[in-house]
Image: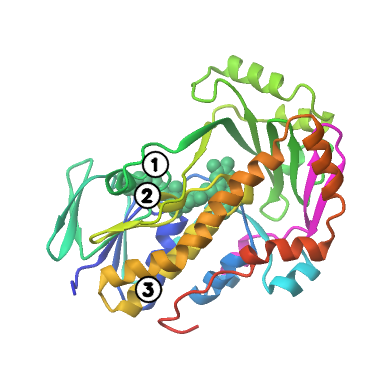
Amino acid sequence: MSHEPILIVGGGLGGLTAALALARGGRPTRVLEGAAEFGAIGYGVQFGPNVFHVFDRLGLTEQVMAVADSPPAVLMLDALTGQELVRIPTRASFRARFKHPYIIVHRIDLHNVLLDACRRNDAIELVAEAMVSGFEERGDGIAVTTADGRTFSGGALVAADGVRSLFRAKLIGDGEPQPIGYVALRTIVPMQELKADVPRDCVVLWSGPGLHIVHYPLRHGSEFNVVNVFRTAAHAERLDAASARAELEHAYRDTHPSMRALIGMMDLRWRRSIGDRAPVRHWHRGRIVLLGDAAHAPLQSLAQGAGMAIEDGLCLAEAIHAADGDYQAAFRRFEAARLLRTARVQLESRSLWDFYHLDEGIARDVRNASVVDWDEAHMFDCLSWLYDGAPVPPALGP
Ligand SMILES: Cc1cc2nc3c(=O)[nH]c(=O)nc-3n(C[C@H](O)[C@H](O)[C@H](O)COP(=O)(O)OP(=O)(O)OC[C@H]3O[C@@H](n4cnc5c(N)ncnc54)[C@H](O)[C@@H]3O)c2cc1C
């Protein structure tokens, strides 16, 4: 067993969770983040109750809840008519069923909770501005080089470097994430600047033909987060502001007036082509293991990509603790524990994507007519595989 620290490439939510969970068992880590600062950018992010199994284990639930909000409900509205199609209550009955809350939080605030915990822990070394550009496996460890020529070595390497992972390219080589012909725009505005007539306290998904908008409040109602997503032939292009505005107006021309008021607020500078990964069976080779989006990036329709990265972080660490430094055994155990759950999130996110974006026609009419019959008990049952959380190898106990 190597006594060197474990290298974690990528200081996103997945990488930091892994560092904290490894430190819990006394294993030192060195987290290498390519950006100039850890967690400097971000928008809103939603989490189901499943992530609280991890936050509880890491002793972070109270700190997370101090920066998060729990909405009264998650709604699905028809983007053309404004009709309410689905309402999932997320307060008392939800808490009673799933034991933990549904939350919305600014990604930076959550990141800071994890970062503060990392900074308080001597076993975790955080290195910013360390864009890893190459690596070399050695007999009893691994060395990486950064774009500015520094070298770091470790006993093993956790690649938490996101959807365009360098390590995935080397280990699996399945190219870029698959674009699906949609783009996303994101914006946060102060709540007092919100003029659109929309529910302000819930998580709302407006579902339309080839488009959707998700919005919810952040920071205890002081800010309003909007993500809008639409199908466009120009999904792979970088557009100037005028063309991007024209494209947006065209895409939403037939939608409900509240939606058109929302798109008037969008910041056109953050425009991203949407893509995901197909599930694969193996995420490790030698002393390197992939985690989070690097291993199994989903579409965002279930809002679970970051949740899965956080679950991975704890599960991987517990597998390493249990294997007492036998990384091969630990990585196999981690894969076995995580594969089907994360693949299901990837596959169900794709199905849900199609379900949200049905074109006008009989299939859409059938969907709208059937979902209004879903009652709370039915919806909670459908979500239980996800929100009940995942078994974690209990190497260190609860
Ligand atoms: C519009 C949108 C909305 C979403 N909403 C939700 C939601 O509500 N809930 C949810 O659970 N998920 C959501 N997701 C998904 C979520 O953002 C991702 O699944 C999650 O961020 C993955 O975490 P990660 O730690 O694996 O990777 P990332 O968050 O991508 O972190 C990777 C880190 O690695 C660093 N890095 C990359 N390459 C290198 C390198 N070579 N060297 C060093 N550092 C490197 C990056 O700078 C970054 O900090 C959403 C995604 C999108 C696009």
Q: Residue at x 23, y 60 (%)?
A: 286
Characterize the local packing of mark 2: few (<14), some (14-19) or many (20 or more) Cα atoms within 10 angstroms.
many
User: Which amino acid is tagged 2?
Assistant: Asp
Q: Residue under label 3, please give it.
A: 319
Task: Tell me where the magenta segment starts and ends, as one range.
Answer: 63-89
Tag 1 or tag 3, which sits nearer the N-term?
Answer: 1
Where residue 131 appears, x then y in whole percent?
Answer: 29, 44
Asked if the beta carbon under badge 2 is closer than 8 A to the nearest atom of ligand 1, the reply is yes
Q: Is residue 33 left or right of residue 345?
A: left
User: Which amino acid is tagged 1?
Assistant: Arg
Specify the quadrant that holds the N terminus. Answer: bottom left
Asked if the beta carbon under badge 1 is closer than 8 A to the nearest atom of ligand 1, the reply is yes
Tag 2 or tag 3, which sits nearer the N-term?
Answer: 2
User: Which amino acid is tagged 3?
Assistant: Ala
Q: Residue under label 1, please give it.
A: 164
Q: Are marks 2 and 1 in contact (CB under 8 Å)?
A: yes
Q: Residue at x 63, y 45 (%)?
A: 351
Q: Is residue 241 visible?
A: yes
Q: Residue under label 2, please give it.
A: 161
Q: Is residue 79 magenta?
A: yes
Secondary structure beneath dot 1 equals: loop
Secondary structure beneath dot 2 equals: loop
Q: Is residue 19 above or below residue 360?
A: below
Q: Residue at x 30, y 72 (%)?
A: 329
Q: Closer to us: mark 3 or mark 2?
A: 3
Task: Name the foreground residue: 54 vs 129.
Answer: 54
Characterize the local packing of mark 1: few (<14), some (14-19) or many (20 or more) Cα atoms within 10 angstroms.
some
Where on the picture, by quarter, is residue 115? bottom left
Task: Name the foreground residue: 202 vs 160.
Answer: 160
